[in-house]
Amino acid sequence: MRCVIVRRSPIHGKGVFAMHALAVAERVLEYRGEITSWRNAVRRHQRESVEGHTSLFGLSDGRVIDGSRGGNSARWLNHACTPNCETIEDDGRIFIQTLRPIDAGEELFIDYLLAVDDPEDEEARAQYACACTAPDCRRSMLAVAA
Ligand SMILES: [Zn+2]
């Protein structure tokens, strides 16, 4: 059953919204797309940015899923530093799961968990700046360096 819809987001570009109320720990989507290196994905996105929307999700091995290639509506999920959905990595696949109950019509957010090769890379920091309204916003969609 479809439980999310893509429409214009007040935060940034398009977003993914709950069509009906969701319980906690519900798997709503799989984050599909081509698995590639961070370097390759960034180069590609500098060439062909989709409305400035970042459709990359970082995997634990440092590679990314590029939702702009063979992706589904999960690529429209916006990043937030305090998201209402978590991402579960299950055998190389990524599933979006709710962290708390979500009202019908609420926008869903994930943490993109993007890992850069060089955490001091100012260009990457600028390109992946975060503008979510969380009090503890990291100002970046990039993961905190381990
Ligand atoms: Zn933020």
Image (tube, rainbow, N blue to C red):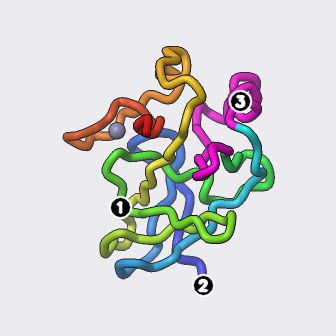
Quick check: which quadrant has ligand 1? top left
Could you say which is closer to the camera, residue 50 or residue 69? 69
Mark 3–mark 1 distance (CA, rounded to whole Å)? 28 Å
Which marked residue is nearer to the observer: mark 3 or mark 2?
3
**Residue stretch in magenta:** 38-63
Q: Considering the numbered disc 2 on the image, is that residue within a helix, a strand or a loop?
A: loop
Horizontal side of residue 12 vs 71, given as left or right: left
Residue plotted at (38% across, 46% down)? 80
Indicate the position of residue 13 as horizontal and vertical percent values.
52, 40
Residue plotted at (60% across, 84% down)? 1
Q: Is residue 112 above or below residue 119?
A: below
* Mark seen at residue 39: 3
Label 1 lies in ligand 1 vicinity (Cβ under 8 Å):
no
Q: Which residue is mark 1?
A: 84
The question of residue 5 being in magenta is answered with no
Q: Which residue is mark 2?
A: 1
Which marked residue is nearer to the observer: mark 2 or mark 1?
1
Which marked residue is nearer to the observer: mark 3 or mark 1?
3
Indicate the position of residue 68 as horizontal and vertical percent values.
73, 45
What's the amino acid at mark 3?
A: Arg
Quarter that holds the C terminus = top left
Q: Considering the numbered disc 1 on the image, is that residue within a helix, a strand or a loop?
A: loop
Q: Are marks 2 and 1 in contact (CB under 8 Å)?
A: no
Label 2 lies in ligand 1 vicinity (Cβ under 8 Å):
no
